[in-house]
Image (spheres, rainbow, N blue to C red):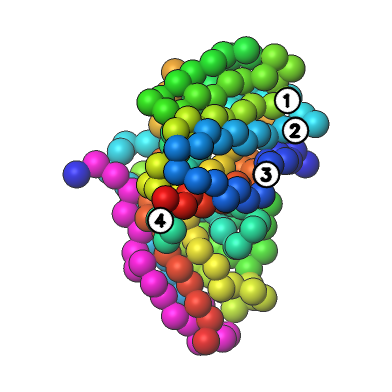
Amino acid sequence: GQQLNQSPQSMFIQEGEDVSMNCTSSSIFNTWLWYKQDPGEGPVLLIALYKAGELTSNGRLTAQFGITRKDSFLNISASIPSDVGIYFCAGLNQAGTALIFGKGTTLSVSS
Amino acid sequence: DGGITQSPKYLFRKEGQNVTLSCEQNLNHDAMYWYRQDPGQGLRLIYYSQIVNDFQKGDIAEGYSVSREKKESFPLTVTSAQKNPTAFYLCATQGQGRIMNTEAFFGQGTRLTVV
């Protein structure tokens, strides 16, 4: 079935640093979504991408939908302690019936 | 308040017992989903329902059952046939984004522990 490969698995950074994570697949996706999950909570949608090549920002977050439609990246600029959490990429499955999720990138920020 | 409510937040179950997790939404979304989350595994789809009185198996449906008698409710039963039920369970709904039914919204989750 369709799979999303997310990397890196974890990151340990200093407050103020920029962060980049990405998601790739051997299949084409028509929608890419990025979520953040705080410990013990449900994921919250950060950015949604619908068009190949699209670059979208949400505050310090920027995400891009790859031209091949097989990848996407998320950048976080000037990280702060509350950026800590697990970041998931997700794409709509081929049937268009449900989202498939990557395994997540765990971000730790030290002040 | 509009949203998705999962209850309980924490649930303990004895081995061999069935248990039902509740998911209620007042977002008027047609589609509802159940995901299971294990450490390092991401979110895996258990069951989903696109409309009342209809539901489909996801990738890991064995040992689980669902019902969708009302638009607002999509309860998940973890049966004794589920061999490794301890996990964090997330309910989600899908509503309109720029393209209909592509953005999922999640509840707060239920952590199930088998003792």
Q: Please, is residue B40 above or below residue B115 in the view?
A: above
The mark that comes first in sequence, 1 or 2, is 2
Looking at the image, residue B68 sits to the left or right of residue A93; the answer is left
Numbered circle sitting on residue A8:
3
Residue at x-position 38% and y-position 47%: A82
CA gap, disc 1 and disc 2: 5 Å
Residue highlighted by disc 1: A70
Residue type at tag 2: Ser
Numbered circle sitting on residue A41:
4
Residue B39 image-quadrant placement: bottom right
Marks 1 & 2, CB-CB < 8 Å contact: yes
Q: Note whether residue B33 is visible.
A: no
Residue B1 percent coordinates (x, y): 19, 44
Q: Is residue B102 magenta?
A: no
Residue at x-position 64% and y-position 27%: A72
CA gap, disc 2 and disc 3: 14 Å
Q: Please, is residue A27 above or below residue A79 in the view?
A: above
Residue highlighted by disc 2: A25
The magenta span reads B2-18
Residue B58 percent coordinates (x, y): 64, 50
Residue A64 image-quadrant placement: top right
Element assignment for label 2: loop
CA gap, disc 4 and disc 3: 22 Å
